[in-house]
Amino acid sequence: MAEIGQDITHARQVLQSGGLVAIPTETVYGLAGNALDDEVVSKIFSAKNRPSFDPLIVHVSNIEQAKNFVEEVPVQAQTLASKNWPGPLTLLLKRKSNIPDLVTAGLDTVAIRVPAHELTQRLLSTLDFPLAAPSANPFGYVSPTTAEHVNQQLGDKLDYILDGGACTVGIESTIMSFEADAPRVLRLGGLSLEEIESVVGPVEVNIHSSSKPDAPGMLKSHYAPNTEIVLVEDFLQKGKNSTSRIGALAFNKYIEGIDPKNQFLLSKSGDLDEAARRLFTGLRTLDQRKDIDTIVTAYVPNQGLGRAINDRIKRATAKE
Ligand code: TXA
Ligand code: MG
């Protein structure tokens, strides 16, 4: 288990001496280290057990700092950044050579984001290097939205956990690319498509979900708990009728035929932002229940953050 606290000075010292610190952001907790130090970046990959072909997001304190690491910022990227940074938006931009190959898995773009969390903002502004940080979960598992989640799974691999409370968005950032000046969403996340389109007009959504993606990190089976998880329609089709060891992750109403005590409701009032905030906690809570062997789940309304929630549900229930 790692030391947990709110000591930014200590976090800074650990990072300056090449250590790993879990940092709070508005989306999920990140497993952070000096993005410009190859040795530290390798440690991040091995702590997560993450394949080296899956590149990392580089966190900076503002758009000016971002410009030290990218060749150019296309107009629409600039517009989106001015409106939404700090916030749950990651931009893929042409990288400068000061970003190590290891961080980008050899790609010529780097993923950059300015997180909106007071502690992490303060930390970033006192560092003279950016922070590479993937979500602080073992590769393929559900992302952490509290310091406790991080400690349970990666505590022994970290030097410090900066505790910033529960994440307020609760789902990873939206990732966008701007190849040939066309804005595209590559990962649905904490900034909704509606908000993006209100700024730059219609954008293409190009979500990879295969078992061998060209765009790394978009693996089909991902965000998965250890307990078997199935969509309600598949569950009903299989004709399972024993309700005893079944749990459910449902939107705003209990799924019929399953004991309500075994169900986690994402938002009783049907609020998609609240559902996003509670999604990963819900998955973890059900996963930890010893008396549940199968989690049944269902899609939520496909709008606002519902799109990102549905993407995670789709990946969690993907076979493979
Ligand atoms: O909200 C978030 O984005 C959180 C917090 C900690 O900032 N971070 C996060 O990182 O979700 P991670 O590593 O779990 O997911 C980053 C995703 C991966 O799917 C990776 O493949 C993709 O970003 N990615 C990173 N750099 C890329 C690049 N240059 N081109 C394409 N995809 C990239
Ligand atoms: Mg992740």
Image (tube, grey):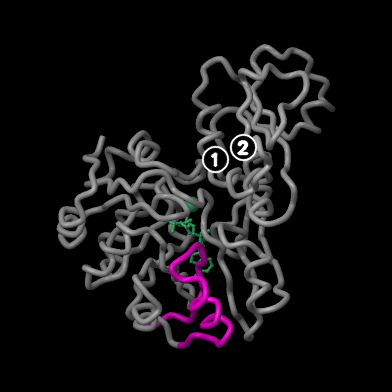
Q: Quadrant of the C terminus?
A: top right
Which residue occupies the extreme front position in the image? Answer: 269
- Crowding around mark 1 (Cα neighbors within 10 Å: few <14, some 14 to 19, many 20+) is many
> Mark 1 CB in 8 Å range of ligand 1?
no
Tell me what residue is drawn at x 44 percent, y 55 percent: 26
The verdict on residue 85 being magenta is yes
Does residue 122 appear to the left or right of 14 in the view shown?
right
Tell me what residue is drawn at x 63 percent, y 38 percent: 267
The verdict on residue 126 being magenta is no
Q: Decide which of tag 2 and tag 1 comes sooner along the chain.
A: 2
The part of the chain drawn in magenta is: 72-97
Q: Quadrant of the N terminus?
A: top left
Q: Provide the secondary structure element on which disc 2 rests.
A: loop
Does residue 265 appear to the left or right of 256 in the view shown?
left
Measured Cα–Cα span from mark 2 to mark 1: 6 Å
- Residue 116 vs 227, above or below: the answer is below
User: Which of the labelled discs sits on residue 278, or is there none?
Assistant: 1
Tell me what residue is drawn at x 29 percent, y 59 percent: 33
Give the residue at mark 2.
Answer: 266
Q: Mark 1 and mark 2 in contact (Cβ < 8 Å)?
A: yes
Q: Amino acid at mark 1?
A: Arg
- Residue 272 vs 99, above or below: the answer is above
